[in-house]
Image (tube, rainbow, N blue to C red):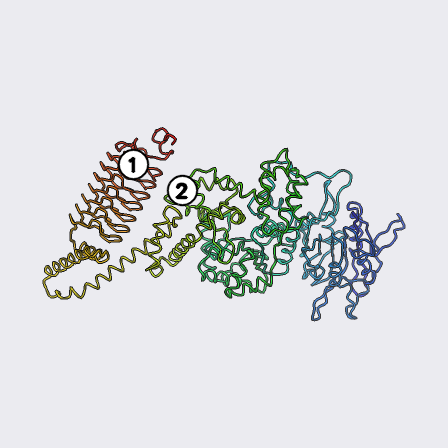
Amino acid sequence: MSRDALVVGINTYDRLKSLNAPAADGEAIAQILQQYGEFRVTRLPAVKDKENETIRIGKQTKVSLTQLERAIVQLFKPDGKPPDTALLYFSGHGLRKNLGIQEGFLATSEVNPDAGNWGLSLQWLRRLLQESEVRQQIVILDCCYSGEVLNFAEADPGDRGKGRDRCFIAASRDFEVAFEEINSQHSVLTAALLKGLEPKQDRWVSNYTLVDLLNQEHHPFPQRPIFANSGEAINLTRKWNSSPVNSTVQISAICPYKGLSYFDCTEADANLFYGRTVLTDELLEKVRSGNFLAVLGASGSGKSSVVRAGLLYQLKLGRKLSGSDTWQLKIFRPGINPLQNLALAFVESELSDIERASQLAKAEELIAKGAVGLGQLITAAQTQRVVLVVDQFEEAFTQCQDITKRQQFFECVLGALQRDDNKLCLIITMRADFLGKCLEQEYGGLAKRIQDHLVTVTPMNREELETAIIKPAEQVNLAVEPELVSQMIADVENSPGSLPLLQYTLTELWQQRTEERLTLTTYSKLGGVRGTLQTRATEVYESLSLEEQQATKRIFLELTQLGEGTEDTRRQVVQRDLVTSQHPEAVINRIIQRLANEKLVVTSTLSNQIAVVDVAHEALIRHWLLLRKWIEESRDILRQKRKIEAAAIEWRDRGKAKDYLLQGKRLTEAKIFHKEQAENLRLSQQAEEFIRASVRQKRNTRFEFVVFSLIIPLGLVIYLAPVVRKQTEIRLLWQTVDAAKRDKSSQRLNQALEQLVKAGESLERRDFSTVDLSRIELSSANIKGAYLSSTNFSSANLSNANLYGADLMGANLYDADFSGANLTATNLYDADLSYVNIRGADLRRAKLNRANFTAADISSADFTAADISSADFTFADFSRAILIGANLHDANLSYAKNLTPEQVKSAKNWDKAKYDEVFRAKLGLPPEPAK
C-alpha cells in the first residue's frame, strides 16, 4: 500500500512576522511519519543536513507559492499512479481575505496582502481534493495568525459519501489565535499531534484515535483544534517490532445481527453496524453545513438504523465532526400526541420521578407556546447545538388523527428553525411514500423544506451488502460460507425494503449455526430471505393454543395502521389496551412476551411507565401472508373501529365535552358495532366509555324533551289542587303506557314509565313482558313482582331499583345498570346479563340458572342461596361478591376476575362448576379430562 506525505513548515516571511515553530513542527511530524507510518515523506522547504547527510526542513529557507502548489499537485494528482494514502501537513501563517467574499489562504514566504498576493487559496485546495483519485486523504493545517486565522471550511471539499476516507485537522477555530507551547519548540496543535501519533501499543493509531486524544488534551491557551473525518478509519502510525494484536471479540455466543429491530445509538449496536459508511458521511455533511435534514426511503431501507447507529453515534463519539460529542442529541417518535412526545424528549431520563414530572410539566408548558416555546427550550440548553431527531415522522399522519394537533406540531418544530445561531438541527426520518401527505396542506412549508434538504436511503450495493453480512460475523469469530454470501446478495440486491428480511434471516442462520459457521444448506432449508420470516411467524402462531391464536390475530391487527393511499404501516399500542373480557391481562402478557422473544414484536416503556407494543418491523406486515390475509378480511371493520376510537380520543382530549359525543346515526352505528364485534375486534375501553356516555346523553336529552312536551297538556290542570293535579298526571301517564304497549312504541312507553317512577309510582306486579325497555332510566324504581320475561332492557339504568320477586326470565339485559338493585328471589332464568353492572345488587334466593353474566361487573353482589346453576360467568368480576349457599352446579366461572377459592367453597356444588386450569389447581381439583 503506497503512502505519501508532504510536510511543510515555513518560518521565514518577507512581510509577515517570522515564526519559530513551523520548521521544527514539520521536521518532527516528518520523522514520526517515516519511523512509524511507512510514509514516503517530501519536505518543504528541504535542505541537506551536512552532519548526518540527511534531508530536513530548513529553518531559514523560504517557500514560494509556485513551489507549494506544485508539491501539493504532485501529492494529490501526480502524473503517474496516485498513492493509496496522501497526507498534507502545513505549519506557518494562515490568512483570510475579506473583500466582499471571504477567502482563506496558506501564506507562503513572499505573500504581500497589500499587493494582492495572499498565498495558496484554500478554495483551490478544495477543488484539487475533489478531483483527486487518492482514496485516503489527510490534511493537517497548523496555521497561526491573530484573529480569524483560518477559514477551515474552505479547505474541506465537503463531498461526503463519495467513497473516500478523509481526515481534516486544523489548529483552531476561525476566530482564535493558534499558539506555540511554553518552553517547547512546537506549537500547541503539533505538540498534541506528536503525542497522539507516538504509538503506545502494537496496533495502529488512526485518525479516529488521534482526534480522541485531541479532544482530551487540556492546555492553558484559548484555542481548540477542529476536525472533520469521513469514511473508514485511516491508519497513520504503529510500532513495527511485532504483529498487531488481534482485537476480535472472542464471544461467539453473541448474535451479531439485529433481526427485525433497528440498530440503535449504542456502542454495542454501532460496532455491528456495517455497510452504511458512505451514507453516514453524507448525513454528517448535511448536519455540519445545515440545520434541517430529511432522511427518506422505503420501509425496511434502514432509515432508523443509519440515523441512530450511524449519524447519531458518530456525533456522540465526536470523531468525525469537531465538538459534536458535546452536543445534545434528542430523539422521539410523534405517535398519537406529537407535541406531548416532543416535550418528553426534553425530560432527562436519569432524574427521579418527581424531578422528571416537574421537568415534563415545564417542557409541556413551553411546547404549548409552539415555536417560541421550543425555541426557549433550545436556548436554555447548555450546549453548542441541539440535534432533534423525529424518527418515523409518518406517524404524524398515521397515528395522529387530529389535523389541528398535526398542524401545530409541524409549525412548532419548523418554526423553531428560524434562528440566527444555528443551534437547533432538526432531522426527520420518513417513509418515502408519505411525501405526498406532506403536500396535502401547507404545513408551514414542510414539503418544500423536505425537498430542499432531502437524502434518500437507497438499497445497498453488492460491496455494502457483503460488508453487512461478513463484518459483524468477524466480530464474534463466526465464519460465513462465500456461497451463502453470494446467494443472499443475489436474493436482496436492488430490492427496496429488504434489509430487515436480510437481518432476520441472518439471525435465524446464527441460531441454527453449525460449528460456528453459517451455511448455504441451512439457508435453503429456511426458505431463503423471503421465506424465513413468514415461515417462522406462522410456526410461532400455530404453536399457540386456540385461545392464544385468536388473541394473537387481534394483537397484530391492532398493531397495523391501515394505509390511506399508502402502504399499511405499524401502529404503536398501549399494552393494557389489548386486554379485553375475552382476552384477559394474563393471556395478553403471556402472548406479548412470547412474540417479543421471537422478535416479532417490540415492547418498550413510555416515560410515564406505560408499556407499549410495536410490530418489530413493517416487513412483517408486508411479507407475512397470514397477516396480510387477516388484514384484508378485516379492513372495513378495522376502519370503522378506528373511526370510533379516534372520536373517543378526541372526546377525551376535549375534556369529555358533550359536544363531542356521538348522536343520531353515528351513535346507532357505534352501538351496533360494539355489540356485533364484542367477540372479534372489541373496542378499546376508552371507546366503550365514550359510547356509554353518548347513550346517557341521549337519554338525558330525551327526558328533557318529554318534560317539555308534557307542559302543555298538564297546563290544563294548573289551577287544580296539587293532589288532583298529580293524580291526573299519573292517570295520563298510565294511559300513555297502555297505548304504547299496544302500539309497541318503546320510546313513548319508556318516557312515560320514567315519569311515573319519578312521580313515585310503583311498577309492582305490572306486566311488561316482551316489550322494549332498552336504555330506560328506572333507577330506584319499585318493580317488585313485575312480569318482565323476554323484555329488552339493554343499556337500561335500574340501579338501586327494587325488583324483589320480579320475573325476568329470558330478558335481554345487555349493558344494563343494576348496581345496588334488590333482585332478591328474582327470576333471571336464561336472561342475558353480559356486561351488566349489578355491583352491590341483592341477589339472595334469585333464580339465575342459565343466565349469561359474561364480563358482567358483579362485585359486592350478594348471591346467598341463589340458584346459579348453568349460568355463564366467563370474565365476570367477582371482587367482594357473596356466594354463600349459592348453587354453582355446572356454572361456568372460567377466567372470572377477582374470584377466590374461599368465595367458591362457600357455595353448594362448587366442585361441579367449570373453571380454567389455573383456578382448578388453586381449588385442589384435578385437571379437566381431555376431550
Residue 384 position in % (x across, y down) = 59, 57
840 displayed left or right of 386: left
CA neighbours of label 1 inside 10 A, class few (<14), some (14 to 19), many (20+): many
Distance, label 2 to label 1, CA atoms, is 23 Å
Q: Residue at 63%, 35% (x, y): give it.
A: 516
Residue bearing the label numbered 1: 891
Residue 848's place in the image compared with 743, above or below, is: above
Badge count: 2
Residue 531 position in % (x across, y down) = 56, 43
Among the 4 quarters of the image, the one containing residue 741: bottom left
Residue 687 position in % (x across, y down) = 37, 52
Looking at numbered disc 1 in the image, what kind of residue is underneath it? Ala
Q: Secondary structure at mark 2?
A: helix
Q: Nearer the viewer, residue 912 or 575?
A: 912
Numbered tag placed on residue 585 in the rendering: 2
CA neighbours of label 2 inside 10 A, class few (<14), some (14 to 19), many (20+): some
Residue 356 position in % (x across, y down) = 47, 50
Looking at numbered disc 2 in the image, what kind of residue is underneath it? Glu
Q: Nearer the viewer, residue 446 or 644?
A: 644
Quadrant including the C terminus: top left
